[in-house]
Amino acid sequence: MTDPRHPNEAPDRELLDALTAQEERLVFTRFDEQTAWEVGVALREAALKAGLPVAISVRRNGQRLFHVALPGASADNDSWLDRKCAVVDRYGHSSLLIGERFRVAGRSFDVDARLDNEHFAAHGGAFPVLVSGTGCIGTVAVSGLPQLDDHRLVVEVLETFLAQSTELGRTGKPAAR
């Protein structure tokens, strides 16, 4: 898989397609404060188990419903969380997907998006909270690892969480694959 952090590498259309498929698949039927807490705790547990130095944020409509910084994370990670979440809030798609869309189009997000780079970062790690019939209502984000790893951690936890939630009848069923 091409790492989109390196602008000299060829854009990866397969990565873009995979990111789009993730968003089609990882959809909640509802998302409230309890759901945000459970998702945040699941991310924290996964990161602690792997010894990852990350900060985690779960937000709904800009409101922080869950936030934690694990050992090794810094205030810089909080800034990255804010910048990545701002991309999701603006575009309604994962921060990695938006960055890759620009790369596939032969453009640079930092230049061509015409947004303040102090407030927006199209780097992996922020994923939209998508609710069936509603769309994007928030973000689940991680910062502290290389961007593909930040993104992968969020997606893996959401996949597990949504599968378990479906079995328990709490949140709902992910969209068909």
Image (cartoon, grey):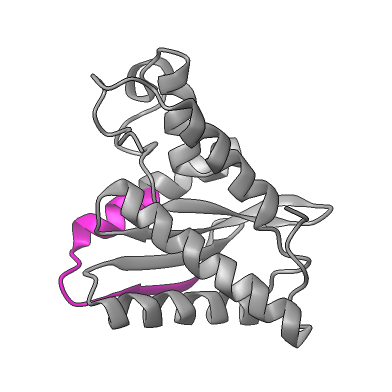
Q: Is residue 173 above or below residue 51?
A: above
* Residue found at the very far top of the displayed protein: 106
Task: Where is residue 114? Give x, y as percent.
Answer: 42, 19
Tally the numbered discs: 0
Q: Identify which residue, 173 or 140, lies in the foreground.
A: 173
Q: What stretch is highlighted in magenta?
A: 64-82
Query: In this view of the protein, can residue 113 be seen by the observer?
Result: no
Question: Residue at the right extreme?
Answer: 133
Residue 79, image x, y percentages: 29, 52
Q: Where is residue 5 in the image (x, y as percent from the top left)?
A: 27, 34
- Up/down of 169 relative to 132, above or below: below
Please report the residue visible at 47 percent of the width from the left and 14 percent of the height from the top. Answer: 105
At a point 38% along the width and 51% down the height, the residue shown is: 82
Question: In the rendered image, which quarter contains the N terminus?
Answer: top left
Taking the image as shown, residue 85 lies to the left or right of residue 167, namely left
Q: Pinpoint residue 172: horizontal percent, then vertical percent.
A: 77, 72
Q: Nearer the viewer, residue 10 or 120?
A: 10
Residue 68 within the magenta-colored segment of the rendering: yes
Q: Nearer the viewer, residue 83 or 44?
A: 44
Residue at the spot x=37%, y=45% of the render?
83
Residue 21 is inside the magenta segment: no
Say whether residue 36 is left or right of residue 150: right
